[in-house]
Image (spheres, rainbow, N blue to C red):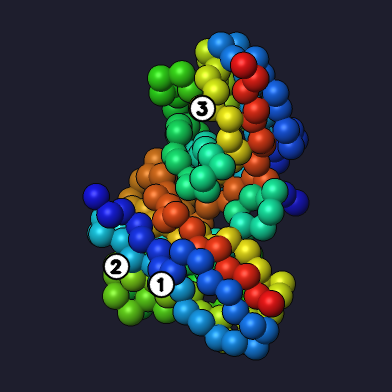
Amino acid sequence: NAGVTQTPKFRVLKTGQSMTLLCAQDMNHEYMYWYRQDPGMGLRLIHYSVGEGTTAKGEVPDGYNVSRLKKQNFLLGLESAAPSQTSVYFCASSYRLGLDQPQHFGDGTRLSIL
Amino acid sequence: AQKITQTQPGMFVQEKEAVTLDCTYDTSDPSYGLFWYKQPSSGEMIFLIYQGSYDQQNATEGRYSLNFQKARKSANLVISASQLGDSAMYFCAMRENTNAGKSTFGDGTTLTVKP
């Protein structure tokens, strides 16, 4: 019962470095999301996807790029990491049909930018 | 304007007592869904309960119930018979029919259950 799997779980980067966070789901969900959570705060939507090959901007998209080449995978990229991007990143997925479909979350990636 | 407002940054409750966590929302869409999630200190997000805008009855799931007051645009979570394991951060979230690809989350309420 894998559900939503995020890779890596922890990462420390230097300012200016790039990296990609991988999210994989095995539930055949159409929708996928990337959120960031800063200390003591709620989730803020970075980007989301309503299907393979489609992406859209959320509330805080600047400094991030995403791709969804396969239905089961959603990648989040940081081209030039900045200390302000230090955060915990959550990936989530859900079924398309029905407002009653909850999001299923990964365990998060703790990212520190020095 | 914030779409989901949770006005209680922190709450305390005695073990075995009931507690209500507040959530108000803002939408002009007549069709929407409201969710509550729990985030323990370990960090994972756990879905607790759902309420649809057209549901006639308040949702219940075990010790969790949702006090849905549509006219007041509130969807408060009620936890009965609190347990130490209920200590966590709780988030209210909304999904609107006009933009079903997105969910909006509140800032959360940290609940501490005292023994």
Query: What is the secondary structure assignment of the residue under circle 2?
Result: loop
User: In the displayed structure, does residue B78 sit left or right of residue B52?
Assistant: right
Mark 3–mark 2 CB contact (< 8 Å): no
Q: Position of residue A29 (x, y in %)?
A: 30, 58
Task: Please tell me whether residue B85 is drawn above or below residue B102 in the rendered image.
Answer: above
Q: Position of residue B5 (x, y in %)?
A: 70, 41
Looking at the rendered structure, the kind of residue marked 3 is: Gly
Most foreground residue, B19 or B65: B19
Most foreground residue, B82 or A26: B82
The chain that hosts pointer 2 is A
User: In the displayed structure, does residue A94 sit left or right of residue B44?
Assistant: left
Q: Position of residue A101 (x, y in %)?
A: 38, 45
Query: What is the secondary structure assignment of the residue under circle 1?
Result: strand
Mark 1–mark 2 CB contact (< 8 Å): no
Determine the residue positioned at 65% across, 88% down. A16
Determine the residue positioned at 35% across, 57% down. A4
The chain that hosts pointer 1 is A
Mark 3 burial class by Cα count in 10 Å: few <14, some 14-19, many 20+: few
Marks 1 and 2, how far apart at CA: 11 Å
User: Residue beneath label 1, please?
Assistant: A22
User: Residue beneath label 2, please?
Assistant: A72
The answer to which image quadrant residue B6 occupies is top right
